[in-house]
Image (cartoon, grey):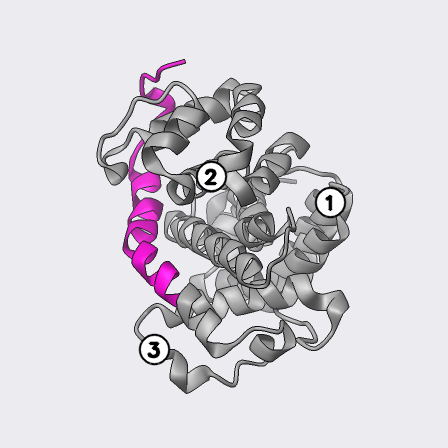
């Protein structure tokens, strides 16, 4: 029997641990049955192509244009005030030429995450944080891959999708009274402790490539010296970089284990930090902008 929101809240107060376990069990069932929205294969391919926007602009546009909903989201975001009202853009090629590869990568990555993974009206603050951090970590992963001279097509996608486990959990919890009634600290605990396990289940169900499975499921639990864990270590370092851009000096953290494990120098990591720092104010604004606006109601060029 489906509980009402009031009954769910009363249940949380009466037996919090038992209800917590019940919610975990329901989440597991929903994930196992695929009752969530996740970026389709072509959208993940788009994220892979974004590692080199200049060379792949035509292919990116062709993939994006195959889904009118995604094309509309990209066009709406690219033409927003966040990017200087430079639009409207008819193609991704035009957008890349006028905004540059970095902003194009950011817009496409954000569009994929917000359209396919972060739907629903609930938990707006967490959704905004997930979206902003996803774009920042994606950019940092792409920059780290360049510093490491890696031609991988998974680095940007790994960063953008690294918190997709949380996004999937929020989707599912938003549809359940037990999830909506969960006290804030318990909901946060649930997201923090379960999201990598959920991400692994989702990645395996969606048949993602090995590096993406590793990055999504092990970015909190990896061996920075293991080649097998390189994707997770790169995301782990990218997350540190995102947090370091709050003003913490990199010199205090030059013993980050991922730096030597990935074969990077402090100078290379400092350079990536500077790049992410320059983007962070807009990325934070981007999360809030996407929460406040209604892209589906906006007229767009086709």
**What segment carries the magenta color?**
273-302
The residue nearer to you, when weighing 205 against 143, is: 143
The disc, 1 or 3, on the residue closer to the chain's N-terminal end is 1
Q: Where 54 sits versus 296, above or below? A: below
Instruction: First in sequence, mark 2 or 3: give its number.
Output: 2
In this view, the mark in front (2 or 3): 3
The foreground one among 120 and 84 is 84
Question: Does residue 282 appear anywhere in the picture?
Answer: yes
Residue at image point 30% right, 22% down: 88
> Residue 296 colored magenta?
yes
Along the horizontal axis of the image, is 254 left or right of 157? left
Residue 263: x percent and y percent? 62, 74
Question: Magenta stretch containing residue 14, yes or no?
Answer: no
Pick the quarter of the image with the N terminus: top right
* Residue positioned 57% across, 40% down in the render: 47
| Residue placed under numbered mark 2 in the picture | 114
- Residue 7 is left or right of residue 204, and the answer is left
Give SS at disc 1: loop
| The disc label shown at residue 208, or none | 1
How far apart in space, not on screen, are marks 2 and 3 (Cα)?
A: 29 Å
What residue is at 63 percent from the left and 56 percent from the top? 150
Estimate how packed mark 2 is, as few (under 14), some (14 to 19) or many (20 or more) residues with alpha carbons within 10 Å.
Answer: many
Residue at the spot of label 3: 248
Residue at left offset 50%, top offset 38%? 53
Task: Report x, y in % for residue 100.
Answer: 37, 39
> Of helix, strand and loop, which one carries label 2?
helix
Image quadrant in which you'd find residue 252 = bottom left
Q: In terms of sequence position, does the residue under pointer 1 or pointer 2 come before the other?
A: 2
SS of the residue under disc 3: loop
In the rendered structure, the answer to whether residue 290 lies left or right of residue 256 reads left
Q: Nearer the viewer, residue 43 or 263?
A: 263
């Amino acid at each position: 029997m489906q509980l009402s929101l009031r009954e769910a809240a009363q249940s949380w107060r009466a037996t919090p641990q038992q209800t917590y376990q019940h919610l975990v069990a329901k989440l597991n069932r929903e994930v196992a049955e695929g009752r969530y929205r996740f970026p389709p294969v072509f959208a993940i391919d788009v994220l892979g192509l974004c590692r080199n926007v200049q060379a792949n602009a035509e292919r990116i546009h062709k993939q994006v244009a195959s889904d009118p909903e995604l094309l509309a989201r990209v066009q709406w975001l690219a033409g927003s005030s966040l990017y200087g009202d430079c639009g409207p853009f008819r193609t991704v090629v035009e957008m890349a030429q006028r905004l540059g590869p970095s902003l194009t990568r950011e817009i496409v990555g954000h569009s994929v995450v917000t359209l396919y993974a972060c739907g629903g009206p609930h938990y707006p603050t967490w959704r905004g944080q997930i979206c902003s951090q996803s774009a920042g970590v994606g950019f940092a992963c792409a920059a780290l891959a360049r510093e490491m001279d890696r031609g991988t097509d998974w680095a940007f996608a790994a960063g953008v999708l690294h918190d997709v486990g949380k996004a999937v959990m929020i989707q599912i919890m938003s549809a359940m009274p037990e999830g909506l009634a969960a006290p804030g600290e318990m909901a946060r605990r649930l997201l923090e402790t379960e999201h990598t396990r959920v991400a692994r289940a989702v990645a395996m169900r969606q048949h993602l490539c090995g590096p993406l499975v590793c990055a999504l499921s092990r970015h909190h639990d990896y061996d920075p010296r293991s080649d097998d864990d390189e994707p997770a270590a790169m995301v782990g370092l990218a997350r540190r970089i995102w947090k370091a851009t709050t003003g913490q000096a990199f010199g205090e953290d030059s013993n980050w284990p991922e730096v030597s494990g990935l074969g990077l120098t402090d100078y290379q990591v400092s350079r990536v930090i500077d790049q992410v720092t320059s983007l962070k104010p807009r990325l934070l604004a981007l999360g809030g902008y996407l929460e406040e606006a209604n892209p589906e109601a906006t007229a767009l060029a086709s």
